[in-house]
Amino acid sequence: MESEEKSSQQPDQVTENEDINSQEVVPSVEERLQEAERKAQDNYDSWMYAKAESENVRRRAQEDVSKANKLAVERFSNEMLTVKDSLEAGLAVEIATVESFKGGMELTLKQLVSVFNKFNIKEIGLLGEKFDAHKHQAIGMIDSEQEAGTVVSVMQKGYQLHDRVLRPALVMVAKAKE
């Protein structure tokens, strides 16, 4: 009988042990909710940090661009001051001959061209070029021995900074022969 009692008690003990183990393994609904809320808060905190960091990067980039623009304008302005000084010196001369005045103007123009070259400002609208609506503004068309659509006269030079047109050249263009 004793053996029957032992065998009948063993299945009950196994069931009790299984219940205890299953309770330990499976967290309660409250624990799962708390864990989910903690993860949600961690994710929210991470997102807020990333958002703040991206706003800081954007703000710093804007500040860097602004500083670079100011520096470029400052450098250009400093170079232009020498041209202004030369013009003022030429005007300050009491008795100037036409030759000395012309010589001073030529030197000042060389200074200005040097500044333009330093900052990559190039003239556009040369004679003999093909008309390009991005670089030229046609004032009119005239009969010419040149090929149709060719620049035959430049009324006002144009300029470009790097690849960007600052001012198109005002030109006369060869008409197609009839």
Image: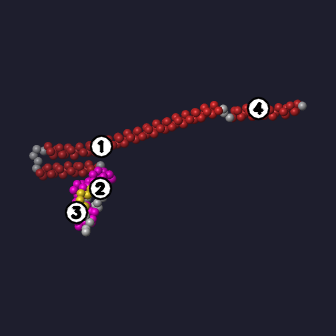
Rendered image quadrant of residue 149: bottom left
Residue 16 located within the stretch drawn in magenta: no
Which residue does the image show at 78% across and 34% down from the upper left? 14
The numbered mark, 3 or 4, whose residue comes first in the sequence reads: 4
The numbered mark, 2 or 3, whose residue comes first in the sequence reads: 2
Which residue does the image show at 27% across and 56% down from the upper left? 137
In this view, which residue lies farthest toward the front? Answer: 178
Q: Position of residue 9 (x, y in %)?
A: 82, 31
The numbered mark, 2 or 4, whose residue comes first in the sequence reads: 4
The numbered mark, 2 or 1, whose residue comes first in the sequence reads: 1
Name the mark on residue 16: 4
Which residue does the image show at 17% across and 50% down from the upper left? 105
Identify the residue position indicated by label 1 in the image.
73
Q: Nearer the viewer, mark 3 or mark 4?
A: 3
In space, the residues marked 2 and 4 are separated at their CA atoms by: 92 Å
Q: Nearer the viewer, mark 3 or mark 1?
A: 3
Residue 165 located within the stretch drawn in magenta: yes
In space, the residues marked 2 and 1 are separated at their CA atoms by: 24 Å
Residue flagged by tag 4: what amino acid is it? Glu
At mark 4, the secondary structure is helix
The numbered mark, 3 or 1, whose residue comes first in the sequence reads: 1
Rendered image quadrant of residue 60: top left
Q: Position of residue 29 (x, y in %)?
A: 65, 32
Identify the residue position indicated by label 2 in the image.
135
In space, the residues marked 1 and 4 are separated at their CA atoms by: 84 Å
Q: Is residue 127 left or right of residue 66?
A: left
Q: Quadrant of the C terminus?
A: bottom left
Name the mark on residue 142: 3
Q: Nearer the viewer, mark 1 or mark 4?
A: 4
Q: Specify whether residue 128 is in view.
A: no
In this view, which residue lies farthest toward the bottom? Answer: 178
